[in-house]
């Protein structure tokens, strides 16, 4: 046997060995390798949205003396929610249970092995993918009380909130709960993530109270470079957030990624143009905020609508969320520090309602892929929006009152003035 032939034989033998090993220790029987790979990659993208995406996006918008506190809150929430998700969170959200809440059959991931499937992917892949959603949702709420809430209170609040608010709503929508039975359409988290997080943030802003000096003396973002970098990471990570929700590497995922990108671009460009006309100059902060508005608004609809519909959704998101932000800050004077409610909750509500319109396959170039009666679907979507808003607001208020009684929600005034980095963590974000 000559050298070339020997090398060809060696390569073939190696490939054969790899195939045998994969067959014995690889995907669960019946799992699709392409779908499984896409979901695992999407899991990484969704975690990337929080660490480092959201952390940097929020961190750049606070004062320099509190930047580490925001980064630390996002990091600690990721760790805490991971533990809670393993212990009981996943079971409450996706256990069989009833129409309101899951059961305890999947506590500590009981019954999930290498061979357990969820559709065409290993259930462990699905559980970890959903963990990313459970992490980013309470992390989003941080924007409502940034720079003024105790770190210990943030942890207690976030843990209780994930179990008592996020897990039940996720079960309602995706785990076989009553909204799913009703026919509510929420592809990737318009309700459980965006409406819930935005509502909780505004309740927290009211209960904890405004930052010292708001609205007259609040300082602008200390580092827009961090914020824009974090925004870019959020944009990329959102492809996994929405596209991964298809749970398959096919046309549905490709369309979800496409409409996500289009809506983000349209939202950012619309906000930028409005600022340019109104104030004479477009801002980076406004542009990336419009981008997030487009992303949050299209999330519920991403698996149902088409590209032209996504363009309209993005434009509406940029315009309406711009107005909502100004109303919140200038008219209502509620210190939702990083605009979580006007961007995520308002965007989520708009997205849920527009899903009923642009998902229909009966409106020409704006059509999506669903044969639905728009009027009836609007009623169902509206009911889902109201239910999630009401339940989240009430439960969040109760949880915040509990944490205030147990620990005290707000840091002392002198610590707030000096910044939470030193007061809460004995560290500085920058060398002075």
Image (cartoon, rainbow, N blue to C red):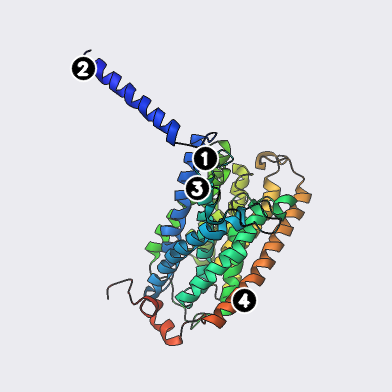
Q: Give the number of the mark in front: 2 or 3.
A: 2
Residue 79 is marked as none
The quarter of the picture where the N terminus appears is: top left
The quarter of the picture where the C terminus appears is: bottom left
Q: Are marks 2 and 1 in contact (CB under 8 Å)?
A: no
| Residue at the limit of the structure toward the left, as seen here | 3
Q: Position of residue 279 (x, y in %)?
A: 51, 67
User: Distance of mark 2 from mark 3, alpha carbons?
Assistant: 46 Å
Q: Give the number of the mark in front: 3 or 4.
A: 3
10 Å neighbourhood of mark 1: few (<14), some, or many (≥20)?
A: some
Question: Which corner quadrant of the image does residue 24 belong to?
Answer: top left
**Residue pointed to by mark 1:** 115
**Residue pointed to by mark 3:** 240
Identify which residue, 212 or 167, lies in the foreground: 167
**Residue pointed to by mark 2:** 3
User: Distance of mark 2 from mark 1, alpha carbons?
Assistant: 42 Å
Q: Give above or below for 164 relative to 255.
A: below
Q: Give the number of the mark in front: 1 or 4.
A: 1
């Amino acid at each position: 046997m000559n050298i070339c032939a020997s090398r060809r034989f060696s390569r073939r033998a190696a490939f054969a060995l790899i195939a045998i090993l994969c067959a014995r220790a690889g995907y669960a029987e019946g799992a699709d390798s392409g779908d499984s790979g896409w979901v695992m990659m999407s899991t990484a993208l969704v975690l990337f949205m929080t660490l480092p995406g959201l952390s940097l996006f929020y961190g750049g918008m606070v004062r320099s003396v509190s930047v580490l506190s925001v980064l630390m809150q996002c990091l600690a929430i990721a760790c805490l929610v991971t533990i809670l998700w393993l212990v009981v969170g996943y079971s409450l959200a996706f256990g069989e249970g009833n129409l309101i809440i899951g059961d305890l059959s999947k506590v500590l991931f009981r019954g999930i092995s290498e061979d357990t499937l969820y559709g065409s992917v290993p259930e462990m892949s699905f559980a970890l993918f959903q963990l990313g959603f459970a992490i980013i949702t309470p992390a989003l709420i941080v924007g409502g009380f940034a720079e003024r809430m105790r770190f210990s209170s943030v942890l207690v609040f976030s843990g209780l909130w994930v179990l008592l608010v996020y897990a039940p709503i996720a079960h309602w929508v995706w785990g076989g709960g009553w909204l799913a039975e009703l026919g509510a359409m929420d592809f990737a988290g318009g309700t459980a993530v965006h409406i819930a997080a935005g509502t909780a943030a505004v309740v927290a802003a009211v209960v904890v109270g405004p930052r010292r000096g708001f609205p007259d003396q609040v300082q602008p973002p200390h580092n827009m470079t961090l914020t824009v970098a974090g925004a870019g990471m959020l944009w990329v990570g959102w492809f996994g957030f929405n596209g991964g929700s298809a749970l398959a590497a096919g046309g549905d995922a490709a369309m979800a990624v496409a409409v996500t990108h289009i809506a983000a671009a349209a939202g950012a460009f619309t906000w930028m143009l409005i600022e340019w006309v109104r104030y004479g100059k477009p801002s980076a902060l406004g542009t990336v905020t419009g981008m997030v508005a487009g992303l949050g608004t299209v999330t519920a609809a991403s698996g149902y609508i088409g590209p032209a519909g996504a363009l309209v959704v993005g434009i509406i998101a940029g315009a309406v969320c711009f107005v909502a932000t100004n109303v919140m800050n200038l008219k209502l004077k509620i210190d939702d520090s990083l605009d979580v409610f006007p961007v995520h909750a308002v965007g989520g509500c708009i997205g849920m309602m527009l899903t009923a319109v642009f998902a229909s396959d009966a409106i020409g170039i704006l059509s999506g892929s669903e044969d639905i009666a728009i009027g009836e679907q609007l009623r169902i979507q509206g009911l889902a929006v109201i239910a999630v808003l009401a339940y989240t607001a009430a439960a969040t208020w109760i949880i915040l009152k509990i944490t205030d009684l147990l620990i005290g929600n707000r840091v002392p005034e002198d610590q707030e003035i000096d910044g939470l980095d030193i007061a809460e963590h004995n560290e500085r974000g920058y060398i002075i």
